[in-house]
Image: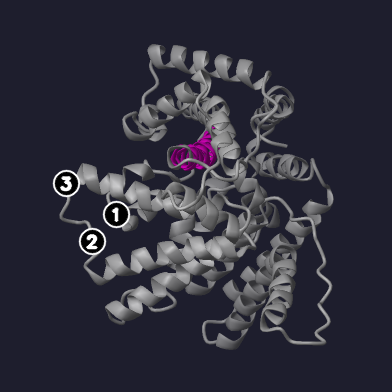
Amino acid sequence: MVFSSHIFLFYFLPLSLFGYYCLPRRAKNVFMTVVSYIFYGWSNPLFTLLMFISTLVDYCCGLIIGLAPADSHRQRKLGLTTAIVSNLSLLGFFKYSGFAMESYNQLFTLLGMDGFDPVPVLRFLLPLGISFYTFQSMSYSIDVYRRDAVCIRNFIDFACFVSMFPQLVAGPIIRFQEVADQLANRVHSFEKFARGVAFFSLGMAKKVLLANACGKVADTAFAAGALHWLDSWFGIVAYSFQIYFDFSGYSDMAIGLGLMFGFVFAKNFDSPYRSASITEFWQRWHISLSTWLREYLYIPLGGNRKGPIRTAVNLAVVMLLGGLWHGASWNFVVWGAMHGILLGSERMFGKKPFYAMLPRSLRIAVTFILVLIAWVFFRATTFAGALDYLGSMFGLVAVPDTALLLDGLLYTPYSLLSMALAAVIVWRAPQTWDWTRQMGPAKVVVVIGVFVSTVAVLSMQSYNPFIYFNF
Protein backbone atom coordinates (compact mmCIF):
# COMPACT_ATOMS: atom_id res chain seq x y z
CA MET A 1 0.00 0.00 0.00
CA VAL A 2 1.36 3.42 -0.92
CA PHE A 3 0.35 6.79 0.47
CA SER A 4 -0.60 8.16 -2.94
CA SER A 5 -3.36 5.63 -3.56
CA HIS A 6 -7.12 5.82 -3.23
CA ILE A 7 -7.22 2.86 -0.82
CA PHE A 8 -4.90 4.65 1.57
CA LEU A 9 -6.37 8.14 1.18
CA PHE A 10 -10.06 7.31 1.43
CA TYR A 11 -10.18 4.10 3.46
CA PHE A 12 -7.07 3.17 5.43
CA LEU A 13 -6.09 6.63 6.69
CA PRO A 14 -9.56 7.88 7.72
CA LEU A 15 -10.38 4.61 9.50
CA SER A 16 -6.99 4.61 11.24
CA LEU A 17 -7.40 8.19 12.45
CA PHE A 18 -10.96 7.56 13.58
CA GLY A 19 -10.02 4.46 15.56
CA TYR A 20 -6.91 6.09 17.00
CA TYR A 21 -8.70 9.14 18.37
CA CYS A 22 -11.62 7.11 19.71
CA LEU A 23 -9.34 5.05 21.94
CA PRO A 24 -7.95 6.04 25.37
CA ARG A 25 -4.29 7.01 25.61
CA ARG A 26 -3.12 3.65 26.96
CA ALA A 27 -4.55 1.83 23.93
CA LYS A 28 -3.23 4.15 21.22
CA ASN A 29 0.14 2.43 20.81
CA VAL A 30 -1.53 -0.98 20.58
CA PHE A 31 -3.84 0.31 17.87
CA MET A 32 -0.96 2.03 16.05
CA THR A 33 1.02 -1.21 16.04
CA VAL A 34 -1.91 -3.25 14.71
CA VAL A 35 -2.72 -0.86 11.86
CA SER A 36 0.99 -0.61 11.01
CA TYR A 37 1.22 -4.39 10.64
CA ILE A 38 -1.90 -4.33 8.45
CA PHE A 39 -0.34 -1.58 6.33
CA TYR A 40 2.95 -3.44 5.98
CA GLY A 41 1.39 -6.81 5.26
CA TRP A 42 -1.10 -5.48 2.72
CA SER A 43 0.86 -6.71 -0.31
CA ASN A 44 2.45 -9.76 1.35
CA PRO A 45 1.45 -10.85 4.89
CA LEU A 46 4.67 -12.89 5.20
CA PHE A 47 6.64 -9.64 5.36
CA THR A 48 5.16 -8.99 8.79
CA LEU A 49 6.78 -12.15 10.16
CA LEU A 50 10.24 -10.88 9.25
CA MET A 51 9.57 -7.52 10.86
CA PHE A 52 8.23 -9.20 14.00
CA ILE A 53 11.35 -11.39 14.25
CA SER A 54 13.63 -8.35 13.91
CA THR A 55 11.55 -6.49 16.50
CA LEU A 56 11.54 -9.37 18.97
CA VAL A 57 15.29 -9.96 18.69
CA ASP A 58 16.18 -6.32 19.25
CA TYR A 59 13.70 -6.00 22.11
CA CYS A 60 15.25 -9.01 23.89
CA CYS A 61 18.78 -7.81 23.14
CA GLY A 62 17.91 -4.41 24.55
CA LEU A 63 16.76 -6.03 27.78
CA ILE A 64 19.90 -8.18 27.94
CA ILE A 65 22.09 -5.10 27.50
CA GLY A 66 20.09 -2.64 29.58
CA LEU A 67 19.37 -4.89 32.56
CA ALA A 68 22.88 -6.34 32.77
CA PRO A 69 24.92 -5.47 35.89
CA ALA A 70 27.23 -2.51 35.39
CA ASP A 71 30.31 -4.74 35.47
CA SER A 72 28.89 -7.47 33.19
CA HIS A 73 30.67 -6.50 29.98
CA ARG A 74 30.33 -10.00 28.53
CA GLN A 75 26.53 -9.96 28.80
CA ARG A 76 26.30 -6.50 27.28
CA LYS A 77 28.55 -7.44 24.38
CA LEU A 78 26.60 -10.66 23.83
CA GLY A 79 23.35 -8.72 23.53
CA LEU A 80 24.88 -6.17 21.16
CA THR A 81 26.56 -8.80 18.99
CA THR A 82 23.35 -10.81 18.73
CA ALA A 83 21.39 -7.74 17.65
CA ILE A 84 23.90 -6.67 15.01
CA VAL A 85 24.50 -10.15 13.59
CA SER A 86 20.80 -11.04 13.42
CA ASN A 87 19.80 -7.79 11.72
CA LEU A 88 22.65 -7.82 9.22
CA SER A 89 22.04 -11.52 8.51
CA LEU A 90 18.38 -10.84 7.80
CA LEU A 91 19.25 -7.92 5.55
CA GLY A 92 22.10 -9.75 3.86
CA PHE A 93 20.11 -12.90 3.12
CA PHE A 94 17.16 -11.19 1.45
CA LYS A 95 18.98 -8.30 -0.18
CA TYR A 96 22.51 -9.39 -1.00
CA SER A 97 22.69 -13.19 -1.25
CA GLY A 98 21.75 -13.24 -4.95
CA PHE A 99 24.14 -10.36 -5.68
CA ALA A 100 26.97 -12.16 -3.88
CA MET A 101 26.46 -15.37 -5.87
CA GLU A 102 26.24 -13.48 -9.16
CA SER A 103 29.46 -11.61 -8.38
CA TYR A 104 31.15 -14.88 -7.40
CA ASN A 105 30.20 -16.51 -10.69
CA GLN A 106 31.21 -13.44 -12.72
CA LEU A 107 34.62 -13.38 -11.04
CA PHE A 108 35.43 -16.96 -12.07
CA THR A 109 34.13 -16.32 -15.58
CA LEU A 110 36.27 -13.20 -15.84
CA LEU A 111 39.34 -15.15 -14.71
CA GLY A 112 38.62 -17.75 -17.39
CA MET A 113 38.89 -20.67 -15.00
CA ASP A 114 38.08 -23.82 -16.93
CA GLY A 115 35.81 -26.36 -15.36
CA PHE A 116 34.20 -23.90 -12.96
CA ASP A 117 30.65 -24.91 -12.11
CA PRO A 118 28.59 -21.74 -11.50
CA VAL A 119 26.73 -21.53 -8.23
CA PRO A 120 22.93 -21.45 -8.68
CA VAL A 121 21.58 -17.99 -7.88
CA LEU A 122 18.46 -18.02 -5.75
CA ARG A 123 16.03 -15.12 -6.07
CA PHE A 124 14.14 -13.88 -3.04
CA LEU A 125 11.37 -11.32 -2.98
CA LEU A 126 12.80 -8.25 -1.26
CA PRO A 127 10.60 -7.28 1.71
CA LEU A 128 9.51 -3.65 1.53
CA GLY A 129 11.48 -1.28 3.70
CA ILE A 130 13.77 -3.94 5.15
CA SER A 131 16.79 -1.64 4.83
CA PHE A 132 15.00 1.03 6.83
CA TYR A 133 13.48 -0.94 9.69
CA THR A 134 16.54 -3.15 10.26
CA PHE A 135 18.74 -0.04 10.60
CA GLN A 136 16.17 1.58 12.87
CA SER A 137 15.72 -1.49 15.05
CA MET A 138 19.47 -2.19 15.23
CA SER A 139 20.27 1.39 16.28
CA TYR A 140 18.13 0.88 19.39
CA SER A 141 20.38 -1.92 20.66
CA ILE A 142 23.49 0.11 19.89
CA ASP A 143 22.13 3.17 21.71
CA VAL A 144 21.24 1.08 24.77
CA TYR A 145 24.74 -0.43 24.73
CA ARG A 146 26.28 3.05 24.55
CA ARG A 147 23.91 4.18 27.31
CA ASP A 148 22.52 6.85 24.97
CA ALA A 149 19.06 5.34 25.58
CA VAL A 150 17.35 3.38 28.33
CA CYS A 151 16.01 -0.05 27.40
CA ILE A 152 12.26 -0.21 27.03
CA ARG A 153 10.33 -2.89 28.93
CA ASN A 154 6.97 -2.48 27.20
CA PHE A 155 7.10 -4.68 24.10
CA ILE A 156 4.10 -3.01 22.47
CA ASP A 157 5.75 0.41 22.69
CA PHE A 158 8.90 -0.97 21.08
CA ALA A 159 6.90 -2.75 18.38
CA CYS A 160 5.11 0.52 17.72
CA PHE A 161 8.48 2.27 17.33
CA VAL A 162 9.74 -0.26 14.78
CA SER A 163 6.53 -0.72 12.78
CA MET A 164 5.10 2.83 12.78
CA PHE A 165 3.55 2.92 9.30
CA PRO A 166 4.16 6.60 8.43
CA GLN A 167 7.92 6.03 8.09
CA LEU A 168 8.10 2.25 7.91
CA VAL A 169 8.91 1.47 4.30
CA ALA A 170 10.96 4.48 3.14
CA GLY A 171 12.02 6.40 6.24
CA PRO A 172 13.03 8.74 7.60
CA ILE A 173 15.10 6.45 9.84
CA ILE A 174 14.05 7.32 13.38
CA ARG A 175 16.41 6.76 16.30
CA PHE A 176 14.72 5.43 19.44
CA GLN A 177 15.93 8.26 21.64
CA GLU A 178 14.17 10.73 19.33
CA VAL A 179 10.73 9.26 20.04
CA ALA A 180 11.16 7.44 23.37
CA ASP A 181 9.34 10.14 25.33
CA GLN A 182 6.70 10.48 22.61
CA LEU A 183 5.88 6.78 22.79
CA ALA A 184 5.05 7.21 26.46
CA ASN A 185 3.47 10.65 26.39
CA ARG A 186 2.87 12.71 23.26
CA VAL A 187 0.80 15.82 22.68
CA HIS A 188 -2.20 15.83 20.36
CA SER A 189 -3.40 19.24 19.24
CA PHE A 190 -5.39 20.84 16.45
CA GLU A 191 -2.36 22.90 15.41
CA LYS A 192 -0.15 19.83 15.13
CA PHE A 193 -2.82 17.94 13.20
CA ALA A 194 -3.37 20.86 10.79
CA ARG A 195 0.36 21.11 10.11
CA GLY A 196 0.41 17.38 9.52
CA VAL A 197 -2.36 17.65 6.92
CA ALA A 198 -0.42 20.44 5.18
CA PHE A 199 2.80 18.43 5.24
CA PHE A 200 1.04 15.37 3.81
CA SER A 201 -0.79 17.31 1.09
CA LEU A 202 2.31 19.15 -0.11
CA GLY A 203 4.37 15.96 -0.01
CA MET A 204 1.81 14.09 -2.08
CA ALA A 205 1.77 16.95 -4.59
CA LYS A 206 5.56 16.69 -4.91
CA LYS A 207 5.19 13.00 -5.63
CA VAL A 208 2.18 12.99 -7.95
CA LEU A 209 2.51 16.31 -9.78
CA LEU A 210 6.30 16.57 -10.08
CA ALA A 211 8.13 13.29 -9.42
CA ASN A 212 5.84 11.24 -11.68
CA ALA A 213 6.01 13.77 -14.52
CA CYS A 214 9.80 14.07 -14.34
CA GLY A 215 10.08 10.30 -13.99
CA LYS A 216 8.43 9.73 -17.36
CA VAL A 217 11.00 12.01 -18.99
CA ALA A 218 13.85 10.17 -17.25
CA ASP A 219 12.49 6.74 -18.20
CA THR A 220 12.18 7.81 -21.84
CA ALA A 221 15.75 9.10 -21.93
CA PHE A 222 17.33 6.08 -20.25
CA ALA A 223 15.42 3.64 -22.46
CA ALA A 224 16.33 5.40 -25.70
CA GLY A 225 19.83 4.09 -26.34
CA ALA A 226 21.99 6.65 -28.15
CA LEU A 227 21.03 10.25 -27.36
CA HIS A 228 22.13 13.70 -28.38
CA TRP A 229 24.08 15.36 -25.58
CA LEU A 230 21.31 17.87 -24.83
CA ASP A 231 18.67 15.14 -24.59
CA SER A 232 20.82 13.07 -22.22
CA TRP A 233 21.42 16.04 -19.92
CA PHE A 234 17.71 16.81 -19.98
CA GLY A 235 17.02 13.19 -19.02
CA ILE A 236 19.42 13.07 -16.08
CA VAL A 237 18.19 16.43 -14.76
CA ALA A 238 14.67 14.97 -14.96
CA TYR A 239 15.83 11.97 -12.93
CA SER A 240 17.49 14.20 -10.34
CA PHE A 241 14.16 16.00 -9.91
CA GLN A 242 12.26 12.72 -9.86
CA ILE A 243 14.29 11.12 -7.10
CA TYR A 244 14.31 14.31 -5.03
CA PHE A 245 10.57 14.96 -5.22
CA ASP A 246 9.80 11.25 -4.91
CA PHE A 247 11.82 10.80 -1.74
CA SER A 248 11.39 14.22 -0.14
CA GLY A 249 7.69 14.02 -0.99
CA TYR A 250 7.43 10.67 0.77
CA SER A 251 9.36 12.07 3.74
CA ASP A 252 6.98 15.03 3.90
CA MET A 253 4.00 12.67 3.86
CA ALA A 254 5.61 10.55 6.59
CA ILE A 255 6.29 13.59 8.76
CA GLY A 256 2.76 14.83 8.16
CA LEU A 257 1.20 11.50 9.10
CA GLY A 258 3.37 11.40 12.22
CA LEU A 259 2.06 14.81 13.24
CA MET A 260 -1.53 13.65 12.73
CA PHE A 261 -0.88 10.84 15.21
CA GLY A 262 0.97 13.10 17.64
CA PHE A 263 4.58 12.20 16.69
CA VAL A 264 7.23 14.72 15.68
CA PHE A 265 9.89 13.36 13.29
CA ALA A 266 13.06 15.20 12.34
CA LYS A 267 13.59 16.94 8.99
CA ASN A 268 14.96 14.58 6.33
CA PHE A 269 15.71 16.99 3.46
CA ASP A 270 17.05 20.53 3.53
CA SER A 271 17.05 21.77 -0.10
CA PRO A 272 20.04 19.57 -1.07
CA TYR A 273 20.40 20.89 -4.62
CA ARG A 274 21.22 24.31 -3.19
CA SER A 275 24.47 22.87 -1.79
CA ALA A 276 27.77 24.47 -2.73
CA SER A 277 29.86 21.33 -2.06
CA ILE A 278 29.40 17.57 -1.79
CA THR A 279 29.99 17.83 1.96
CA GLU A 280 27.10 20.28 2.20
CA PHE A 281 25.00 18.07 -0.06
CA TRP A 282 25.25 15.18 2.41
CA GLN A 283 24.32 17.50 5.24
CA ARG A 284 21.09 18.24 3.37
CA TRP A 285 20.21 14.99 1.52
CA HIS A 286 18.50 12.08 3.33
CA ILE A 287 19.60 13.51 6.67
CA SER A 288 18.39 10.54 8.71
CA LEU A 289 20.57 8.10 6.72
CA SER A 290 23.56 10.46 6.81
CA THR A 291 23.16 10.75 10.58
CA TRP A 292 22.87 6.97 10.96
CA LEU A 293 26.01 6.34 8.90
CA ARG A 294 27.92 8.98 10.84
CA GLU A 295 26.86 7.77 14.29
CA TYR A 296 27.08 4.01 13.75
CA LEU A 297 29.78 3.62 11.09
CA TYR A 298 31.93 6.71 10.49
CA ILE A 299 32.61 7.52 14.16
CA PRO A 300 33.31 3.88 15.17
CA LEU A 301 35.81 3.68 12.27
CA GLY A 302 37.67 6.60 13.82
CA GLY A 303 35.86 9.55 12.25
CA ASN A 304 38.20 12.50 11.82
CA ARG A 305 40.29 11.74 14.90
CA LYS A 306 43.20 10.02 13.14
CA GLY A 307 44.39 12.56 10.62
CA PRO A 308 43.22 13.76 7.23
CA ILE A 309 44.23 10.67 5.24
CA ARG A 310 42.48 8.25 7.59
CA THR A 311 39.47 10.58 7.63
CA ALA A 312 39.29 10.48 3.83
CA VAL A 313 39.54 6.68 3.88
CA ASN A 314 36.78 6.45 6.50
CA LEU A 315 34.52 8.64 4.39
CA ALA A 316 35.19 6.52 1.31
CA VAL A 317 34.38 3.30 3.20
CA VAL A 318 31.19 4.76 4.66
CA MET A 319 29.97 5.96 1.28
CA LEU A 320 30.81 2.65 -0.38
CA LEU A 321 28.68 0.85 2.19
CA GLY A 322 26.06 3.58 1.92
CA GLY A 323 25.88 2.97 -1.81
CA LEU A 324 25.55 -0.78 -1.26
CA TRP A 325 22.79 -0.12 1.29
CA HIS A 326 20.71 1.39 -1.51
CA GLY A 327 20.81 -1.74 -3.61
CA ALA A 328 22.58 -4.99 -4.48
CA SER A 329 24.35 -3.77 -7.59
CA TRP A 330 27.83 -2.62 -8.56
CA ASN A 331 26.23 0.54 -9.93
CA PHE A 332 25.29 1.58 -6.39
CA VAL A 333 28.82 0.77 -5.21
CA VAL A 334 30.24 3.02 -7.94
CA TRP A 335 27.77 5.76 -7.00
CA GLY A 336 28.85 5.50 -3.37
CA ALA A 337 32.53 5.43 -4.34
CA MET A 338 32.17 8.62 -6.38
CA HIS A 339 30.61 10.46 -3.47
CA GLY A 340 33.17 8.95 -1.10
CA ILE A 341 36.08 10.19 -3.23
CA LEU A 342 34.58 13.67 -3.49
CA LEU A 343 33.87 13.83 0.25
CA GLY A 344 37.36 12.58 1.06
CA SER A 345 39.02 15.10 -1.24
CA GLU A 346 37.02 17.94 0.28
CA ARG A 347 37.93 16.82 3.78
CA MET A 348 41.62 16.77 2.80
CA PHE A 349 41.31 20.46 1.95
CA GLY A 350 39.37 21.64 4.97
CA LYS A 351 35.88 20.63 3.80
CA LYS A 352 36.35 22.76 0.70
CA PRO A 353 35.80 21.56 -2.88
CA PHE A 354 38.39 22.03 -5.61
CA TYR A 355 36.16 24.80 -7.00
CA ALA A 356 35.98 26.72 -3.71
CA MET A 357 37.30 29.90 -5.34
CA LEU A 358 34.16 30.30 -7.44
CA PRO A 359 31.18 32.46 -6.37
CA ARG A 360 28.53 30.52 -4.43
CA SER A 361 26.09 30.44 -7.36
CA LEU A 362 28.70 28.76 -9.57
CA ARG A 363 29.73 26.39 -6.75
CA ILE A 364 26.09 25.32 -6.50
CA ALA A 365 26.03 24.73 -10.26
CA VAL A 366 29.25 22.65 -10.24
CA THR A 367 28.04 20.62 -7.25
CA PHE A 368 24.77 19.89 -9.03
CA ILE A 369 26.65 18.73 -12.15
CA LEU A 370 28.79 16.36 -10.06
CA VAL A 371 25.67 15.00 -8.39
CA LEU A 372 24.06 14.53 -11.82
CA ILE A 373 27.02 12.52 -13.11
CA ALA A 374 26.84 10.25 -10.06
CA TRP A 375 23.06 9.87 -10.47
CA VAL A 376 23.70 8.21 -13.86
CA PHE A 377 25.07 5.13 -12.10
CA PHE A 378 22.21 5.23 -9.59
CA ARG A 379 19.58 5.25 -12.35
CA ALA A 380 21.11 3.01 -15.01
CA THR A 381 20.24 -0.67 -14.75
CA THR A 382 23.70 -1.89 -15.81
CA PHE A 383 27.26 -0.60 -15.54
CA ALA A 384 27.65 -0.67 -19.33
CA GLY A 385 24.40 1.27 -19.68
CA ALA A 386 25.70 3.93 -17.29
CA LEU A 387 28.91 4.32 -19.31
CA ASP A 388 26.93 4.61 -22.55
CA TYR A 389 24.70 7.27 -21.04
CA LEU A 390 27.70 9.24 -19.79
CA GLY A 391 29.15 8.97 -23.28
CA SER A 392 25.98 10.53 -24.66
CA MET A 393 26.15 13.34 -22.11
CA PHE A 394 29.63 14.29 -23.26
CA GLY A 395 29.12 13.71 -26.97
CA LEU A 396 31.34 10.62 -27.14
CA VAL A 397 28.96 8.25 -28.93
CA ALA A 398 27.62 8.16 -32.45
CA VAL A 399 24.01 9.29 -32.61
CA PRO A 400 21.74 8.09 -35.45
CA ASP A 401 19.45 10.54 -37.23
CA THR A 402 16.45 8.68 -35.84
CA ALA A 403 17.35 10.00 -32.37
CA LEU A 404 15.73 13.28 -33.39
CA LEU A 405 12.36 11.56 -33.13
CA LEU A 406 12.90 11.37 -29.39
CA ASP A 407 12.46 15.12 -29.05
CA GLY A 408 8.72 14.71 -29.61
CA LEU A 409 8.53 12.54 -26.49
CA LEU A 410 10.92 14.47 -24.26
CA TYR A 411 9.95 18.06 -24.90
CA THR A 412 6.17 17.96 -24.65
CA PRO A 413 4.48 21.05 -23.18
CA TYR A 414 3.53 19.07 -20.07
CA SER A 415 7.06 17.79 -19.45
CA LEU A 416 8.60 21.22 -20.02
CA LEU A 417 6.11 22.83 -17.64
CA SER A 418 6.73 20.14 -15.02
CA MET A 419 10.51 20.50 -15.31
CA ALA A 420 10.32 24.29 -15.06
CA LEU A 421 8.07 24.14 -12.00
CA ALA A 422 10.36 21.55 -10.42
CA ALA A 423 13.39 23.79 -10.98
CA VAL A 424 11.65 26.79 -9.41
CA ILE A 425 10.70 24.77 -6.32
CA VAL A 426 14.16 23.20 -6.03
CA TRP A 427 16.08 26.48 -6.11
CA ARG A 428 13.65 29.23 -5.15
CA ALA A 429 10.63 28.02 -3.16
CA PRO A 430 10.50 27.83 0.66
CA GLN A 431 10.76 24.41 2.25
CA THR A 432 7.67 22.58 3.47
CA TRP A 433 9.20 22.47 6.96
CA ASP A 434 9.33 26.28 7.15
CA TRP A 435 6.18 27.08 5.17
CA THR A 436 3.93 25.00 7.45
CA ARG A 437 5.15 26.40 10.79
CA GLN A 438 2.28 28.88 10.89
CA MET A 439 -0.94 27.87 9.17
CA GLY A 440 -3.25 30.82 8.44
CA PRO A 441 -6.49 30.93 6.38
CA ALA A 442 -4.65 31.71 3.13
CA LYS A 443 -2.34 28.74 3.53
CA VAL A 444 -5.27 26.47 4.38
CA VAL A 445 -6.91 27.46 1.08
CA VAL A 446 -3.66 26.71 -0.77
CA VAL A 447 -3.36 23.30 0.90
CA ILE A 448 -6.96 22.39 0.05
CA GLY A 449 -6.44 23.43 -3.56
CA VAL A 450 -3.20 21.46 -3.83
CA PHE A 451 -4.80 18.36 -2.30
CA VAL A 452 -7.84 18.44 -4.60
CA SER A 453 -5.64 18.99 -7.67
CA THR A 454 -3.32 16.16 -6.66
CA VAL A 455 -6.17 13.69 -6.12
CA ALA A 456 -7.67 14.68 -9.48
CA VAL A 457 -4.37 14.04 -11.28
CA LEU A 458 -3.80 10.84 -9.29
CA SER A 459 -7.12 9.45 -10.51
CA MET A 460 -5.90 9.81 -14.11
CA GLN A 461 -2.35 8.50 -13.63
CA SER A 462 -1.25 4.93 -14.10
CA TYR A 463 2.44 5.74 -13.54
CA ASN A 464 3.01 6.02 -9.78
CA PRO A 465 6.23 4.30 -8.61
CA PHE A 466 8.05 5.02 -5.34
CA ILE A 467 11.79 4.81 -6.03
CA TYR A 468 12.89 4.17 -2.45
CA PHE A 469 10.50 1.25 -2.03
CA ASN A 470 13.19 -0.72 -3.88
CA PHE A 471 15.74 -0.11 -1.14
**Does dot 2 land on a helix, a strand or a loop?**
loop
**Does dot 1 land on a helix, a strand or a loop?**
loop
**Cα gap from disc 3 to disc 2, whole angstroms:** 13 Å
* Mark identifier at residue 359: 3
Say which quarter of the image contains residue 428: top left
**Does dot 3 land on a helix, a strand or a loop?**
loop
Q: Which of marks 3 and 1 is nearer the N terminus?
A: 1
Q: Earlier in the sequence, mark 2 or mark 1?
A: 1
* Mark identifier at residue 277: 1
- Residue 253 lies within the magenta run: yes
What stretch of residues is rendered in magenta?
A: 232-259
Q: Are marks 2 and 1 in contact (CB under 8 Å)?
A: yes
Q: Which amino acid does label 1 sit on?
A: Ser
Q: In which quarter of the image is the N terminus?
A: top right
Whether residue 413 appears in this view of the structure is: yes
Horizontal side of 427 relative to 336 (left or right) equals left
Q: What residue type is labelled 3?
A: Pro
Horizontal side of 467 relative to 442 (left or right) equals right
Give the residue number, with chain letter if any, for mark 2.
352
Please determine whether, in this image, residue 137 is positioned above or below residue 7.
below
User: In x, y percent, where is residue 322?
Assistant: 51, 63
Please determine whether, in this image, residue 460 is positioned above or below residue 2.
above
Please determine whether, in this image, residue 396 is positioned above or below residue 416.
below
Horizontal side of 277 relative to 250 (left or right) equals left
Q: Which amino acid does label 2 sit on?
A: Lys
Whether residue 264 appears in this view of the structure is: no
**Cα gap from disc 2 to disc 1, whole angstroms:** 7 Å
Q: Residue at x 59, y 75 (%)?
A: 65
User: In x, y percent, where is residue 388?
Assistant: 54, 54
- Residue 279 lies within the magenta run: no
Q: Which residue is drawn at 46% across and 67% down?
A: 337
